[in-house]
Image (cartoon, rainbow, N blue to C red):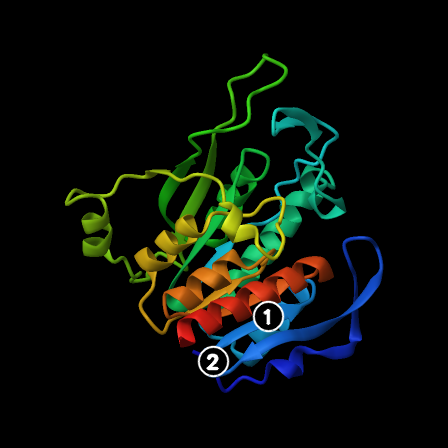
Amino acid sequence: MISDFDFNKVSDSRAEYLGPDGEKNHTAVALTDKAKNVHLLKGECLDVMSKIAEKYPNGCFDMIFADPPYNLSNGGFTCRSGKMASVNKGQWDKSKGIELDYQFTLDWLELCQRLLKVNGTIWVSGTHHVIFLVGHAMQTHGFKILNQITWEKPNPPPNLSCRFFTHSTETLIWAAKSKKSKHVFNYEDMKAEAGGKQMKSVWQFTAPTKSEKTFGKHPTQKPLQLLERCIRASTNEGDFVLDPFAGSSTTGVSAVTRGRGYCGIEADEHFIQISKQRLVSAIQKEAN
């Protein structure tokens, strides 16, 4: 827990960065609740994480959940509500080429490793567009890969081209900071949830429900149940969770619900506003 850290210090008028549409922005604190240890920062993840790492060179987070851009906005099409729809999600999701995509992956994972406590773990989700880069970068940095989780979607959109198998899964890699880490795994809780048997590495969850999009939606939003399982499996109550690609802060809502602290980093103002509403709502519910 880093409740003594003044998150306003990451706000620096000189720290300009280009937002998702090319506009200039500044790192800023969007929301802070010190009592709940919940924080939302607007800024580019590399810049903000670097500033936190300067204050905590030995790490300060017990767990990180990262849902980085999948780089799949390539002009293709998918099926949404029975109709053909573009897969393009925004400039932030477009590939910059394999070399630059991989360098970015190396850079943000290096900062994540610095920010993890000695026994901390990281979860990274992705499809084939990015997850193999993530796996290679993790091994390059010396993370200890613990599990490869397959998230199965029971009702995926059909493949319109009829030239491939229907894409119905995403992959999560769970890894410890280093080979020497003594990571948290709440085995008995997971066993109980699996009906008294060891929980397997294939998890089935539906897409986010309508109620999870009350304040708006993110195009790559994850279901609350998925994040809650990750958090319950690998952290203890009172632990501190980071999400460097916060989006609509599903990680944050799950953390608040499960009695954990949260720090989210997001560059897009639209998603910042959705995150703020979701986090405030979650905090109020826990207070009642």
Q: Closer to the camera, 214 or 230?
A: 214
Image vertical order of residue 274 relative to residue 161, above or below: below
Q: What SS does tag 1 mark? A: strand
**Which image quadrant is residue 78 in?**
top right
Disc 1 marks which residue?
40
Residue 62 percent location from the top left of the image: 40, 67
Q: Residue at x 47, y 72 (%)?
A: 283
Q: Residue at x 33, y 62 (%)?
A: 181
Amino acid type at circle 1 is Leu
Disc 2 marks which residue?
2
**Viewer can see residue 59:** no
**Which image quadrant is residue 13 in?**
bottom right
Residue 53 percent location from the top left of the image: 56, 73
Image vertical order of residue 254 relative to residue 68, above or below: below
Q: Closer to the camera, 141 or 80?
A: 80
Amino acid type at circle 2 is Ile
